[in-house]
Image (spheres, rainbow, N blue to C red):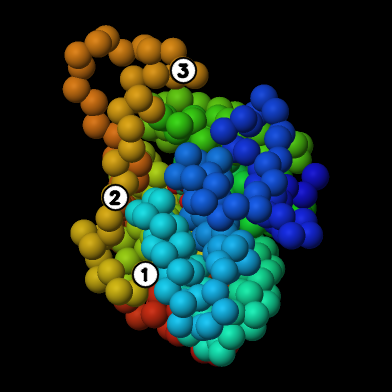
Amino acid sequence: MEVRPVRWEGEALVLIDQTQLPHRLVEIRYRDWREVAEAIRRMVVRGAPAIGAAAACGLTLAAEAVEAADMSLFRQRWLEAAEAFARTRPTAVNLFWAIERMKAVVAACDSPHEARRRLREESEAILREDVEANRAIGRYGQELVPDGARILTHCNAGALATVGYGTALGVIRAAVEAGKRVHVYADETRPRLQGMQLTAWELVQEGIPVTVITDNMAGMLMRRGEIDLVVVGADRIAANGDVANKVGTYSVAVLARWHGIPFYVAAPTSTVDLSAADGSAIPIEERSSEEVTHIGGVRIAPEGVHVINPAFDVTPADLVTAIITERGVARSPYTQSLSQMVLASTGEAR
Ligand code: MRU
């Protein structure tokens, strides 16, 4: 089954409601851009590339809703929507990348009518290009996966976190398509459980063997020699190769280094932020304490306890064996290899 978490159906944007998986596969249709922004904030749609794609489609809906005969009024009103999307989630740079791409379209248009048409085309291009990029990431990445590999992944970097196919799971899918046998270990990924609820669901759908582990089991498995490589996605990669991804990724990377296991990051060049010199420039989202104190709406922590809930952490580039992009496999020194890949993709887009 091809999972498409973000897609156009006629005039409506259709999102898979990821808060209901793995129990129910529910799609929600959107015509109102404000509801799309809320869906990103509530994590109905989540995962860096999927957030960017949903925002691009939301900004297309916003253009269709703006009533303005002249271009300067149109621009002013539409930019309010762009600002609202920029406030939904702070870490995944694909959101800001998509907003900037849509802004460039509006800047180049002479009339609201033209802007509406060209924004829709741009959103369609963003959806199409993301799947193409993920397939290319898969092709490059699968070469790093030996036959029989036991692969650990964290969070969900699958079809659900993108427009389709996935980044880290794209590498795994491509390895399977190349005839390799793999076994995936999915960290459950507290507090939102994307590994258990989304990664495991996707892999079960496709018949790829998967074992769910709690986040604190990875070290024990590595010590027993039961993990051959790690592959994860990313929310923002700084120019020097520092990687922001779901909290817990850093711990996995440290464990992998200690045990001599390759640690790969799979992400499109739209996740690379060359304006962030290193990981310290990446804003880390702090989410509600209820995500930690509650599971499935049931309180599991004592009243009065202090809680922190940073949604992401930063893995220093030193711990990253390679970064797999749609332009090829970047290796240290990342400042050079990543900027070459980003320039190659922006050059082609022009
Ligand atoms: O908070 P989320 O679920 O949006 O976080 C998602 C992740 O951290 C993913 O691993 C990352 O976005 C890569 S998606 C291909």
Q: CA distance from mark 1 to mark 3?
A: 36 Å
Which of pointers 2 and 1 lies earlier in the amino acid sequence?
A: 1
| Rendering coords of residue 303 (x, y %) | 25, 11
Give the residue number, with chain letter if any, for mark 3.
Answer: 297
Viewer-proximal residue, 182 or 224?
A: 182
Q: Is residue 207 depicted above or below 278 in this figure?
A: above
Give the residue number, with chain letter if any, for mark 2.
Answer: 284
Under tag 2, what secondary structure? loop
Residue depicted at 55% across the width and 40% down the height: 44
| Rendering coords of residue 343 (x, y %) | 45, 84
One can see residue 51 in this view: yes
The nearer-to-camera label among 1 and 3 is 3
Under tag 3, what secondary structure? loop
Query: Mark 2: is the Cβ under 8 angstroms from ligand 1?
Result: no
Amino acid found under the numbered disc labelled 1: Asp
Which of pointers 2 and 3 lies earlier in the amino acid sequence?
A: 2
The C terminus - image quarter: bottom right
Which of pointers 1 and 3 lies earlier in the amino acid sequence?
A: 1
Could you classify mark 3 by the number of other residues whose Cα lies within 10 Å: few (under 14), some (14-19), or many (20 or more)?
few
The nearer-to-camera label among 2 and 3 is 3
- The part of the image, by quadrant, that contains residue 174 is bottom right
Q: Is residue 113 depicted above or below 60 in this figure?
A: below
Residue depicted at 49% across the width and 30% down the height: 193
| Rendering coords of residue 202 (x, y %) | 67, 39
Viewer-proximal residue, 128 or 229?
A: 128
Give the residue number, with chain letter if any, for mark 1.
Answer: 273
Residue depicted at 21% across the width and 59% down the height: 280
Viewer-proximal residue, 210 or 134?
A: 134
Amino acid found under the numbered disc labelled 3: Gly
**Position of 63 compared to 86: left or right?**
right
Under tag 1, what secondary structure? strand
